[in-house]
Image: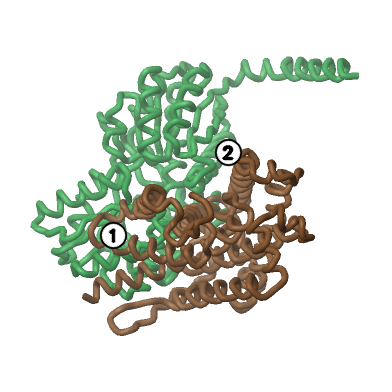
Amino acid sequence: MKNRRHLLTLGTAFALGALGLPALAQQPTYKIGYQLPLTGNTAQYGIDFKNSAEIALDQFAKAGKPFKVEIVFEDSRSDTKEGVAIARKFVDDKAIVGVLGDFTSGVSIASAQIYKEAGMPQLSQTASHPDYTKVSEWQFRNITTQAQEGPLNAEWLYASGYRKVAVIAEQTDWGQTVVSNFVDKFKALGGQVVFSEFFNRGLADFRPIITKIARDKPDAIYTGYFYEDGAQFLKQMKQLSVTIPVHSTSASYNQQLITLAGADAEGMKLTATFLPNNPAKNVQDFVAAWKAKTGQAEPGQFPAQAYDAVNIMLAALERAHPNVTRKSLRDQLAATKNFPGVTGDTTFDADREPAKKLVRAQVKNGAFVAVDK
Amino acid sequence: MDYYLQQLVIGLSLGMVYALVAIGFTLIFGVLNVVNFAHGEIYTIGAFAGLLIFVTFAPPLVVVLLIVLAVGALTGVGLERFAFKPFRRFSDEATLKSRAMREATLMSSLALSIVAREGIELFFGSQFQALPLSHMLNSPIKIGPVTIVDGDLIIFGTSFLMLAGLQFVLKYTSVGLSIRAVSNNPLGARYVGINTDRTIAWTFAVGSGMGAVAGILVGLYYGAIFPAMGFTPGIKAFVAMVMGGLSSIPGAVICALIIGISEALSSIFVSSVWQDLVAYAFLIITLIFFPRGIFGGARERV
């Protein structure tokens, strides 16, 4: 009985193989690895990325291209050790020609060491630490770094008439760059940073910090946090009746911030690359596909970054086809020029950094809207 | 001066949150002499249960608290049944006093807690749950130079009620009497005809019910309900319990307040990144200098 079932399975496998082989010969399938957190504390970001990637892949499959693409998702839990293990796995799989991810700069940089040794192109949708693309010529990113965003925000705050500013950010590699890039420019402009502190990501109670900030009476607060910490911070500001204007980075740009903080989020200003109410067709197509797939409200900036990253990778594959190797894919990625994505046009410069245009936005009546100042 | 007063008040409210968790935690330890690592998850389950009730029925807060209390009690009994009872197959003296048995339940409760947390994460996702903002317990109340919120008063009232209620149950009811007997000497209690298994189940019901209520209250207080929310309060409650001398509930409550106030005051002098260090420092100081805890009796070393 057992043997018979075994034979049956084998037979089916052969039959499928025989059917599959000619199809494969006509249409090659390229494999891309995607390392991202699907469980753990940052799972919500990874799951968003996976949804974005599947939307992009779905649209690609329907476009009738001469080849197929398969994405292998691996869960890194935003853990450096896991990330490195996944990197080794991807590198060992000869069919994988390129890698997307990871989510955090820390894990992306750790994995990058493996990809550098093996010669595997890596494109992260969110790793914004300056050191990431410095690892080797194989690393790309599709997000503006704080080196671009910090000075822009410094100019914005200074132009708003703020001279004394308090700065807080999460205690991570990324948080450090938020503070340093902003502070350097703001001081160069002639402003004063009266308070600067880091906090542990996921801090439950911001009130001790807020009380400290209020004592120094700054004109504005510049913050480096993601949406959950941001929502907590804004709610507790309101709780303590502190009414200092808050500015933030694109990292806190997420509709969930407004859902979680409600009216307490009103008035917060930030820079962003993606606004879901942008009327451009590709943006509206993506927003519609996102709503249909996830049943959620508008996507935030991060899913949009991931969507663009996958599409940039697919476009590079298309240019490299039919001679797709890890090397040729890298060269085609490097040649990305004016790629029309939902987060604006993307061109990789000689250092594999994207140049994107940032817009100024503010929370008004429960939505992020573009503002001039 | 106002600044220091405000930090002190914030510290008190932090401490009250920890105390709320520590009460149930300490009660269970006092009876079984084992750490229930799943208490943090009972807290999380309480918060999620409360959130679901709010979203579906929107009843008044008191009703939600009572339902959550029941959910927590049931979960606690289930937890005891699956993680603790199987290890009490033998009731001879040697087994009851053996270290191996204690460590086994330590691991089994830890295992169940991981299953529960990952299960919640799989089902709800790891992000903060959106909760109806009107239900949040954070409307500011100004008292002179300092600001508190209505949640502070509710949490204080609930902690006080729990503490007083527990003392009443332990001193004046037959269940309380048997809980104290089992806690004192499980074998002796069995010899005089107390149903130890049932008593232990009752303890878990009471302790976990309180843990679950703490979860929904703190969740509404911060507006943050997510699968990993039980971890930090669990650690703080554990430290408070150790400082308080393991089985002294009032001791644990006082130590929880000390930890909360110290954390808030520490942020005056150092960056908040170091805030979590305060609890661990207290833990180490207690273990080295007060091995019986600050309020502990002469019963056992930590």
Q: Which chain is brown?
A: B
Quadrant assignment for the N terminus of chain A: top right
Q: Which residue is mark 2?
A: A58
Q: Secondary structure at mark 2?
A: helix
Q: B138 or B26, which lies in front?
A: B26
| A68 on left or right of A347 | right
How many residues crowd around disc 2 within 10 Å: few (fewer than 14), some, or many (20 or more)? few
Q: B117 or A227, which lies in front?
A: B117
- In the image, residue A3 sits, relative to residue A75, either above or below, namely above
Q: Chain of mark 2?
A: A
| A223 on left or right of B204 | left
Residue at the location (49% across, 32% down)?
A34
Shown colour of chain A: green
Q: Which mark is residue B266?
A: 1
Q: Locate residue A22: give its quadrant.
A: top right
Residue B71 drawn at (x, y percent): 68, 64
Q: Which mark is residue A365?
A: none
Question: Do badges 1 and 2 share one subunit?
Answer: no
Residue A251 visible? The answer is no
Residue at the location (64% across, 68% down)?
B69
Q: Secondary structure at mark 1?
A: helix
Residue A295 drawn at (x, y percent): 59, 55
Quadrant assignment for the C terminus of chain A: bottom left
- In the image, residue B77 sits, relative to residue A309, either above or below, namely below
| B34 on left or right of A203 | right
Three-letter code, disc 2:
Asp
Residue B155 drawn at (x, y percent): 49, 73
Residue at the location (62% across, 15% down)?
A25
Q: Locate residue A235: give its quadrant.
A: bottom left
How many residues crowd around disc 1 within 10 Å: few (fewer than 14), some, or many (20 or more)? many
Residue that sits furthest to the right in the current view? A1
